[in-house]
Amino acid sequence: MTKYVVLGSGVIGYYTVFSLLERQVPGSDITIVAEFWPGDEYVEYASPYAGANFSCITDDDDKTMFYDQYTYENLAKIQQKLGGAEASGLDRYMSTEFWDRMPSEKKKAGYRTYLQNYEELTELAPGTEYGIKFLSWNFNTVKFLKASKAYFEKQGVTMKRAKLSHVCQAFGADTKVVFNCTGLGAKHLGGVNDLACYPTRGQICIVKAPHIKDNTMRWGDDYCTYIIKRPFSNDQLVLGGFMQKDWHTMATYQDQTEDIWKRTTTLNPKILSANPHGTSFEDLEVVRVVSGLRPSRHGGVRIEKEHVENGKYVVHNYGASGYGYQAGLGMAVEGVNLALAKDSKL
């Protein structure tokens, strides 16, 4: 194995590799080990299923706010490294977001400092107390993950498909640091066995909607409604969703699909009213209905450095739940900083 090993081929693992390369670690010193890769489908390989845009869903603690801001301000670097918007599957769209309850002043003040084209709305969706509009980032998840993998290979990063039963199996003779970016897998990975990990199930309906050009989101106490334009996907629109804690099934349910249609078309009536094919649900061209399991954790994300033996370390980075794409680059920077710290004492 190489000097640095990243466990996991999801967005947190990939952001970790980008962060290592940004710190001038040679690609030849990095190996990614994963059981599943972009293009594969598995119940706990969550990254390909995400709606994936920058939204204002996260908490207002200082660390999470830093993760958000850092990711938002540095995604352009990744977009450029991957060859631009179309090649990377990463593009910019306006986003309108509403809250049923007023967000904290701390959260609102933070967004004002860095969100581009930021505007506080005076005309709100019925039943909401606050709304904003800003320039977001949207991901075509599979395209982004595949483009990232191809970029890493060009940098000399080693890719290894393997299923490990214990985190220590990732260490080779020369390995100094293993980054544990296994998401829900951290619950069952030997040497980690974090029982605080749990899935938060979501279900989405992907439709064709060339007439919708931006995002609309609504955040409630125990639900979310979102409309996300998927870039470079032949006009796909992601409609969601659900936040079902500790649901393990990947099944999809017709009543939930119908609930998604109702909530999203109420939030943005143009989905139906401006549809060139007709104004009823039956006139929407449904591409796919799918569910996914967000890698959540009681107590929030775990970003922690753990000494194993003889100067070898594991840096844990998992538990991002539904905000891996929008906050994960900041999380990765924190993990890499821990790994590369001159003083390795805990």
Image (cartoon, grey):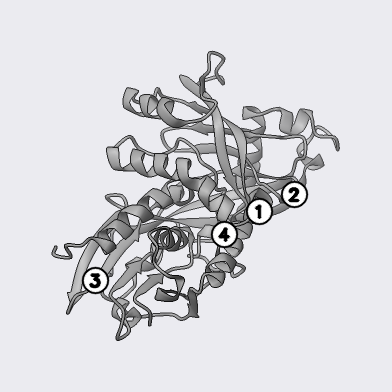
Mark 1 and mark 3: Cα distance apart in space: 41 Å
**Amino acid identity at mark 3:** Tyr
Where residue 174 sits: x, y (%)?
A: 31, 82
CB within 8 Å, label 3 to label 4? no
Quick check: 165 above or below 220? below
For the residue labelled by badge 4, is the local secondary structure a helix, a strand or a loop? Answer: helix
Q: Which residue is mark 3?
A: 313
Q: Which residue is mark 2?
A: 286
Q: Which residue is mark 1?
A: 289
Query: Which residue of the protein is positioned furthest toward the top in this rendering?
Result: 122
Report which quarter residue 275 is drawn in: top right
**Amino acid identity at mark 4:** Pro
Question: Which residue is at 41% across, 39% downward?
Answer: 69
Where residue 49 sits: x, y (%)?
A: 57, 56
For marks 1 and 4 on the same chain, the one whose residue lies earlier in the sequence = 4
- Disc number placed over residue 48 in the picture, else none: 4
Mark 2 and mark 1: Cα distance apart in space: 8 Å
For the residue labelled by badge 2, is the local secondary structure a helix, a strand or a loop? Answer: strand
**Amino acid identity at mark 1:** Val
Question: Which residue is at 76% across, 32% downward?
Answer: 272
Which mark's residue is nearer the viewer, 3 or 4? 3
- Disc number placed over residue 195 in the picture, else none: none
CB within 8 Å, label 2 to label 1? yes
For the residue labelled by badge 1, is the local secondary structure a helix, a strand or a loop? Answer: strand
Q: Is residue 313 left or right of residue 122?
A: left
Q: Quadrant of the N terminus?
A: bottom left
